[in-house]
Image (cartoon, helix red, strand yellow):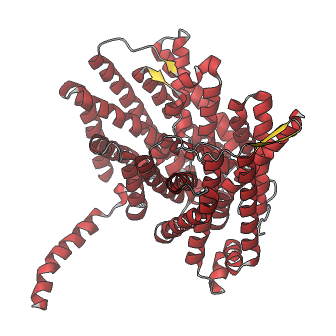
């Protein structure tokens, strides 16, 4: 019953986002696109960070490679949709090969290694000027149509990716794979002992965490029409996505979607009102999150909270009576 | 003669790198925390040195102890009131928390100091030995960096607090049972990390222009050096720093300066996979 409620909420949320091009202005559609984009990346990251419990910070590398693979394919005459598919496959293969190497590491070393991947891909992209345009960036062929149509198209593509990612995460959650991943998260050695093929499970989780980011990156590149190494491989992005998942609730199905939605909306408010302080406020949110919401929004015991609150309100007059 | 010049440049750069990485390595080794604030601490030290110098025209070398002590205080407070609360959590939590704190510090710096590159110019000229060319400010920076590294080594080795830090690193629980106040030791260790970062910042402001955009670069160097040298040991960081300085200066000469940083990262990934304890610091208890 509870599950139906959850998925109903997800479906309603998707319908709300999908309805924005019909009802709202361009600014709202932009926000909706951001929400869809970050939700899909958060759901992706959840495979490795939430289910498997590996602190992976290489999201921006996959996103950036997706941007560049899509853009370069298009510039070399590959049709739009095929270029997106190519970028997705390219990132998937890259992640699988990288995962086979980097997933030998654990804990802090894995975290450092995965951050280094972001730096490394950025540095290589900016110094390989003949292919990628270096620090000058690349122009990506613009999408056809007027601005309204373009943003509606981008929104629907991003939403499709989000839905596919979400359905995959439901499937993984209920399959042997998901069970194995959760075992790895609790105790990797024990999981290995009882016959979970930890290496290949981890590689699959890592690849799943990359593939949707690659797709999103390729679509994003077509949407904005211009990409450069600093923006595509940004260290901020690589930390934002895990923070969104933590905000919603890591390892849950709906958590990443909820966290990404809340985070993007908060960010919009802060961008609009405190332009100069936006980074500090995001930092403040992170600090608050770590101390007060360590398990995310989904795991709060709302009933207890409500009860406590009611008790307090109910208690207050009594105390006054006593003291008088 | 070229080779010797490159070698010298590498060693000068390497000593500065060692100074950058030593605090980071100590914090990682003892507290088991990847301190994302480290880059911002360095830049903060550099900015404080620049503005103090601009205001008072005192040579930043004399200001170094004051600035570094200020950063020690900042680090101590941050650790005592914030990071200590989650110090035993998994790396995802601690790393995210220090990154959040870093975003706040970074934002404060860009608002109050702006992102304009600034450099303390002392115009000390340069030493010419035969064909070799050595700017005096860089030599001075190198001397200071090595001096500080030596001092920290002595503190860790011979002082009471240094022994306490090493004890906590070896076994937190046993240290608690021996009457060491672990939370305090953690805060002091983090403070020392910030102290060394601040000192490195002051030294860097003498040699290179300082701007907030460099925080990530410095942090990246600290990662690489820690992996090369191993964690938590002063000699490890020194060797790692000098190794990275030499590698970058040779790579800059042979395949172009824009690729020098890439070489460092590739080497680091390779080492992470082949030998994650680092070249030196197998145990690293000083």
- The percent position of residue A201, horizontal first and vertical second, equals 61, 45
Left of A92 or right of it: where is A146?
left
* In this view, B271 is above or below B27: above
Residue B5 in view here: yes
- The percent position of residue B3, horizontal first and vertical second, equals 88, 36
Residue at 50% x, 65% y: name it.
B74
Left of B236 or right of it: where is B173?
left
* In this view, B24 is above or below A13: below
* In this view, A230 is above or below B62: above
Residue at 64% x, 17% y: name it.
A130
The C terminus of chain A, quarter of image:
bottom left
Q: Nearer the viewer, residue B97 or A297?
A: B97
- The percent position of residue B38, horizontal first and vertical second, equals 58, 55
Q: Nearer the viewer, residue A44 or B53?
A: B53
* In this view, B184 is above or below A127: below
Residue at 43% x, 60% y: name it.
A290
- The percent position of residue B192, horizontal first and vertical second, equals 62, 67
Residue B95 sits in which quadrant?
bottom right
Count of marks overlaid on the render: 0
Residue A202 in view here: no
């Amino acid at each position: 019953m509870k599950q139906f409620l959850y998925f109903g909420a997800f479906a309603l949320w998707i319908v709300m986002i999908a309805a924005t091009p019909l009802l709202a202005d361009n600014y709202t559609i932009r926000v909706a696109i951001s929400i869809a984009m970050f939700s899909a990346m958060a759901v992706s990251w959840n495979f490795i960070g939430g289910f498997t419990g590996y602190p992976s910070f290489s999201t921006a590398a996959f996103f950036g490679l997706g941007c560049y693979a899509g853009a370069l394919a298009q510039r070399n005459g590959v049709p739009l949709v095929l270029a997106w598919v190519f970028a997705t496959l390219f990132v998937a293969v890259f992640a699988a090969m990288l995962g086979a190497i980097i997933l030998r590491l654990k804990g802090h070393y894995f975290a450092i290694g995965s951050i280094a991947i972001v730096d490394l891909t950025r540095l290589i992209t900016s110094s390989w000027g003949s292919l990628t345009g270096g620090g000058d960036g690349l122009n990506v062929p613009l999408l056809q149509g007027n601005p309204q149509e373009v943003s509606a198209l981008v929104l629907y593509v991003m939403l499709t990716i989000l839905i596919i990612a979400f359905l995959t995460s439901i499937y993984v959650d209920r399959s042997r794979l998901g069970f194995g991943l959760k075992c790895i998260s609790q105790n990797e050695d024990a999981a290995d002992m009882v016959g979970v093929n930890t290496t290949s499970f981890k590689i699959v989780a890592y690849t799943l965490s990359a593939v949707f980011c690659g797709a999103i990156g390729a679509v994003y590149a077509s949407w904005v029409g211009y990409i450069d190494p600093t923006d595509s491989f940004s260290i901020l992005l690589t930390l934002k996505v895990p923070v969104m998942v933590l905000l919603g609730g890591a390892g849950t199905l709906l958590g990443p979607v909820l966290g990404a939605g809340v985070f993007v909306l908060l960010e919009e408010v802060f961008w609009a009102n405190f332009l100069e302080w936006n980074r500090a406020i995001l930092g403040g949110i992170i600090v608050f999150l770590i101390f007060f919401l360590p398990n995310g929004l989904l795991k709060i015991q709302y009933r207890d909270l409500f009860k406590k609150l009611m008790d307090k309100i109910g208690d207050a007059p009594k105390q006054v009576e006593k003291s008088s | 003669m070229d080779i010797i010049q490159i070698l010298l440049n590498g060693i000068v750069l390497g000593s500065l790198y060692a100074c950058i990485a030593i605090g980071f390595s100590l914090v990682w080794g003892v507290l088991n925390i990847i301190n994302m604030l480290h880059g911002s601490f360095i830049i903060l030290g550099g900015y404080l040195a620049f503005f103090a110098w601009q205001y008072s025209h005192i040579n930043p070398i004399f200001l170094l102890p004051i600035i570094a002590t200020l950063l020690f205080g900042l680090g101590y407070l941050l650790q005592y009131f914030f990071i200590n609360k989650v110090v035993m959590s998994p790396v995802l939590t601690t790393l995210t928390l220090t990154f959040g704190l870093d975003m706040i510090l970074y934002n404060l710096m860009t608002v109050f100091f702006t992102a304009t590159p600034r450099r303390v110019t002392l115009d000390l000229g340069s030493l010419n030995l035969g064909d070799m060319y050595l700017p005096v400010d860089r030599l001075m920076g190198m001397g200071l960096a090595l001096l500080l590294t030596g001092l920290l080594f002595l503190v860790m080795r011979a002082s009471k607090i240094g022994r306490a830090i090493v004890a906590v690193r070896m076994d937190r629980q046993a240290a608690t049972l021996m009457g060491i106040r672990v939370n305090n030791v953690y805060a002091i260790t983090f403070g020392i990390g910030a102290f060394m970062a601040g000192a490195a910042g002051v030294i860097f402001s003498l040699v290179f222009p300082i701007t907030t955009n460099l925080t990530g670069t410095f942090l990246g160097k600290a990662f690489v050096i820690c992996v090369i040298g191993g964690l938590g040991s002063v000699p490890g960081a020194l060797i790692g720093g000098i190794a990275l300085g030499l590698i970058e200066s040779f790579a800059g000469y042979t395949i172009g300066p824009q690729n020098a940083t890439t070489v460092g990262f590739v080497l680091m990934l390779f080492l992470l996979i082949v030998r994650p304890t680092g070249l030196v610091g197998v145990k690293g208890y000083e």
